[in-house]
Amino acid sequence: MSESHYLSRAQEYGLAATTAVVTANAYYIHPIISEVADSFSVGQAEIGIVPALNQLALALGILLLLPLGDRYSNRRLCILFVSLQSLAMLGMALATQFLVFTAASTILGFVTVAPYLLPAFASKRVAPERLGQVTAFLTAGVIFGILVARVGAGIVAEQFGWRTVYWIAVALMFAVTLMLPVSMRSETSADKTPTGSYHELVLSVFRLTRTYPEVLWSAAIQALNFAMFTATWLALALHLTSPSLGYGVDTVGYLAGIAVVSIFATPRLGRLADKIGARRARVYAALLQLFGVALLYPLGFSAWALIVPLVLINLVGPSVDVAGRMTFLSLDPSIRTRLTTIYIVIMFVGGGIGSILGTWSFDTYGWAGTCAAILMASIVVTAMSIMAERSWRARQA
């Protein structure tokens, strides 16, 4: 490819901004979930259905829609899906009934495919020596989007109400929809890879799970890890804003800002994984995360004290995901997208389960019960990581 076909720096920033905005949509509800529940007069357990269905719909969308990227223009697909996301966000902002709000959120999840198409698009339009740099740049966009969503939503909702959060999100979505045609170049015929039918592509995903069982193992670990992440933040929002503690949703947003440590730590821990191996690095990250999770209950009755476990969890939690992806991203390039599909689908199923677990356990057993469930999940993540590392070493011996 000639340099004239490479993405400009402005286009790279445009793609990273798009990634941040479209990823953020699923996370606005985390700090403001109690206000949304009160607005629709639903209970703490019932409101958990909203993020749960969003995550499960996202998993289904990845499974059914992401394979289209191997057959059709990534540019056209991204513009289409981002436009549909904008309409779904508009539905959430306008909803006056809980059922309508939940349906719009579920549709939003189903069409949130662009964050997984954009890296594939960019990988064809950068110099080989800059592929890792640009991929990391887009990944930083994902983390930044989650961070801004969780911090900003709490602060904005405290001052102006939760609907203002979604109106701002709608404005951002329409902005990136208009920006996408400029940020993404039109593909040429050389960009399209001959593949089988759509039906064959989807079925091949299931066949690959039998051929590469370690992908399933890594996906299961990350599913539990993501369930812990989701359950922690949803339950934490309910806990801090409960009558016994009485903090505002802005406090939840400020605590969510702790996730900024992952933006700086994750690339460094990724380099460590390059040196010592992904599986061993995942064990170390899981052990440190377990220590942080164990501190959630004893330090969970003060916003200031919670900083300690939240820093530990956010410091290494994303590294479990990075290390998990590294276990299969070195395999045949022609199947990496489909292997990633397997991994992401299972991960978001875990996120959906975590959404239900976090709100239901808090509603039923309070903060103590929620922390016990999260701690058990963390123990399982650590045990599975150790087993995976030992199994790998045994196969290499």
Image (cartoon, rainbow, N blue to C red):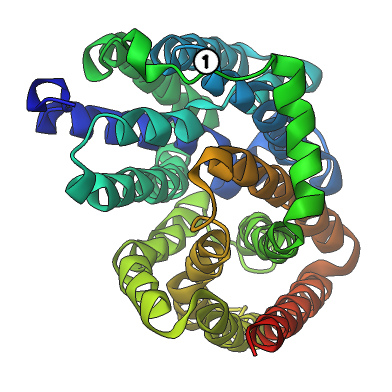
Q: Is residue 317 visible?
A: yes
Q: In the image, what residue type sits under mark 1? A: Phe
Q: Residue at x 45, y 52 (%)?
A: 250
Q: Position of residue 181 (x, y in %)?
A: 28, 10
Pointer 1 local density, CA inside 10 Å: few below 14, some 14–19, many at least 20: many
Label tally: 1
- Is residue 35 depicted above or below 69 in this figure? below
Q: Nearer the viewer, residue 82 or 365?
A: 82
The residue positioned 68% from the left and 18% from the top of the image is 104
Q: For the point 32% across and 12% down, which residue is it?
A: 187
Query: Residue 185: image x %, image y %?
Result: 25, 14
Q: Nearer the viewer, residue 5 or 27?
A: 5
Q: Is residue 303 above or below residue 42?
A: below
Residue 48 in sight from this viewpoint: no
Which of these two is toward me, 167 or 316? 316
Residue at the disc numbered 1: 81
Against 183, residue 351 (above or below) is below
Residue 74 figure quarter: top left
Q: Position of residue 289 (x, y in %)?
A: 57, 80
Q: From the viewer's side, name the closer residue of 277 and 84.
A: 277
The C terminus is located in which quarter?
bottom right
| Residue 351 image position (x, y, % from top left) | 70, 50
Q: Circle 1 sits in a helix, a strand or a loop, which is it?
A: helix
Quadrant (top left, top right, bottom left, bottom right) of the N terminus: top left
Q: Residue at x 21, y 35 (%)?
A: 126
